[in-house]
Image (tube, rainbow, N blue to C red):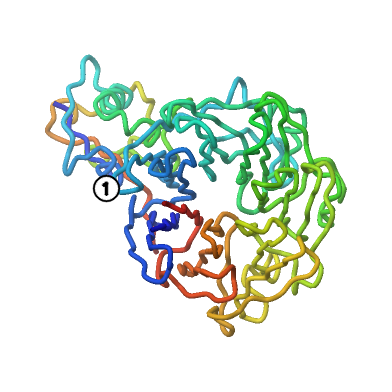
Amino acid sequence: MIRVVLPAHLRTLAGVSGEVSLEVVGDVTQRSVLDALEARYPMLCGTIRDHGTLQRRAFLRFFACTEDLSRESPDALLPEAVARGTEPFLVIGAVAGG
Amino acid sequence: MSKVRVLVGTKKGAFVLTSDGKREQWEVSGPHFAGWEIYHVKGSPVDPNRLYASQSSGWFGQIIQRSNDGGTTWEQMGNKFLYDGVPGTHQWYDGTPHPWEFKRVWHLEPSLTDVETVYAGVEDAALFRSADGGKNWEELSGLRGHGSGPHWAPGAGGMCLHTIILDPSDAERMYIAISAAGAFRTDDGGRTWKPINQGLRSEHTPDPTAEVGHCVHHIAMHPSRPGTLFMQKHWDVMRSDNAGDLWQEVSGNLPTDFGFAIDVHAHEPETIFVVPIKSDSEHYPPDGKLRVYRSKTGGNEWEALTKGLPQKDCYVNVLRDAMAVDSLDSCGVYFGTTGGQVYASPDAGNSWAPIVRDLPAVLSVEVQTLS
């Protein structure tokens, strides 16, 4: 299972309180993980990536295994530890407030 | 016994304020959608318990919420606002072409006759319609396609379509306003549009009387006189008596004719309200005094309404969608401030009292009169 950590506001929208676990078929990439996430939680469509272009929203970034993957191709394989489920895929919002 | 429900959108959530017809004691519910910007909340005239809310965030984009029980519970609706065809470009602040990009919904206008139909005014400026209660949205692209779209430019707050007025006497007629393109009217249900900006003068622009390029801040109409419109422009308060074909200035003796909000008394179509703001670079009232101005003559002659409003050291703003009226026998007038106060007057502006004082900055206020 793929583990995904969402920002608080998206957890509220999705109605979940902690990490999300997803079954991903085939290669584990940003695209396949986000496709699976949006299929299971359609209320998140448009909140992480643009409806039309599927581009990552500007104030969000993707991390895993302490690496910033935001600028990687959406079809690049995610780290093996994410694919194995030992490390989560992190969706992180820009820090605001000060 | 009548009841009043005030729907308040703020920078950090929505609030629902309710009172009986006396409008003295209020219950406050919220924040709904805590932490999100709520640009607008509005109820259906067909079914007052059907509410629509625009919830948005710089991080997570646009969400549309719907309630079927007057705001007690909400369900998330569709948020797919895709421009029709290739969206093309409008002007950027420096005059260069800039791609049309959806940012948020500024205003939601439920149909006067069909509970499932609702219109959305968005940034970058366009008009969308949902015929299924907010699940799916379709652009009425005749507006952007009218021909002047590539010349529209944003105001400081963005290129927003912020005003949607439905004509109760003509289902095919609708008015919209865009900052800073101007006002437009359709007479065929949104298929084609014409700019209705003749008579407006915008001195800060290269062509002060151009067909488009005017920073209209808000327009109000009384339902009994759908051909008469009142406008708060960036500078100037205007009126039109021919459905926007020609405007005349009615700023009269206002201390400043800059402002955002404007509304019409529920029972007196020539009684209008504005909140003068000092200037476009100083978004607060003149002299630190928060004053609503009322004209009972449809403009030109204005009186300051101050009873119950702070008359010293007040430096809040009142935004374009943050004033509304109820339709009780003694018309109630309501407005919210960027300081988080929502003021109510149960006597058409003669006296005021805060319903709440410490909300987040208020973006919008709508009122429902319930029987």
Of residues B255 and B234, the one nearer the viewer is B255
Q: Is residue B117 above or below residue B355?
A: above
Q: What is the quadrant of residue B258 in the picture? A: bottom right
Side of B296 where A78 appears, left or right? left
Residue displayed at 47% across by 38% down: B46
Q: What is the quadrant of residue B315 in the picture? A: bottom right
Amino acid type at image mark 1: Ala
Of residues B251 and B328, the one nearer the viewer is B328
Side of B354 where B156 appears, left or right? right
Of residues B340 and B66, the one nearer the viewer is B66
Q: Is residue B140 visible?
A: yes
Residue tagged 1: A8
- Tally of numbered tags: 1
Q: Is residue A53 visible?
A: no
Provide residue B6's location: percent of width, then percent of height.
Answer: 44, 57
Residue displayed at 65% across by 38% down: B167
Residue sitting at the far bottom: B312
Q: What is the quadrant of residue B129 in the picture? A: top right
Provide residue B185's location: percent of width, then percent of height.
Answer: 72, 36
- Could you tell me which secondary element the residue under label 1 belongs to? helix
Chain of the residue on which disc 1 is drawn: A
Provide residue B203's location: percent of width, then percent of height.
Answer: 84, 57
Residue displayed at 52% across by 40% down: B103
Quadrant (top left/top right/bottom left/bottom right) for the N terminus of chain B? bottom left
Check disc 1: other Cα within 10 Å, few if <14, some if 14-19, many if 20+. some
Provide residue B28's location: percent of width, then percent of height.
Answer: 34, 63
Q: Is residue B25 above or below residue B125?
A: below
Side of B31 where B179 appears, left or right? right
